Amino acid sequence: MTLVGAVIASLGAATFAFVVDPLWVYLVSPALMLVTTLAATLAGTSDIGRIRVSANIRE
């Protein structure tokens, strides 16, 4: 019995089976992760061109 099976069994379910949708697992989910990562990267680096290094260096 797997760890997940033991946890589900402790909640009262006698059997439990995961149903895997290959389209979701191999296409949709990675595409969503890629889009999210790309959007976060673009949002985080969009203002990097406005930073002036010489103005931020203070001795």
Image: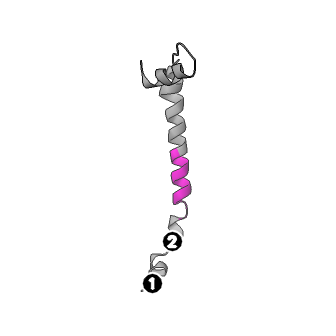
Q: Position of residue 10 (x, y in %)?
A: 53, 22
Amino acid type, residue under disc 2 in the picture:
Ile
Magenta span of residues: 37-47
| Residue name at image x 56 percent, y 16 percent | 13
Q: Indicate which label's residue lies in the foreground, 1 or 2.
A: 1
Q: Which residue is mark 1?
A: 58
Amino acid type, residue under disc 1 in the picture:
Arg
- Residue 21 visible here: no
**Secondary element at image label 1:** loop
- Residue 59 visible here: yes
Q: Residues within 10 Å of mark 2 (few under 14, many from 20)?
A: few
- Which secondary structure class fits the magenta region best? helix
Q: Residue 3 versus residue 20: which sits nearer the camera?
A: 3
Q: Position of residue 39 (x, y in %)?
A: 55, 48
| Total residue callouts | 2
Q: Position of residue 54 (x, y in %)?
A: 45, 80
Q: Which residue is mark 2?
A: 51
Q: Residue 26 versus residue 20: which sits nearer the camera?
A: 20
Asked if marks 1 and 2 touch (Cβ < 8 Å), the reply is no
Say whether residue 43 is magenta.
yes
Q: Is residue 58 above or below residue 19?
A: below
**Secondary element at image label 2:** loop
Say whether residue 33 is magenta.
no
Sequence order check: which comes first, mark 1 or mark 2?
A: 2
Q: CA distance from mark 1 to mark 2?
A: 14 Å
| Residue name at image x 53 percent, y 16 percent | 16
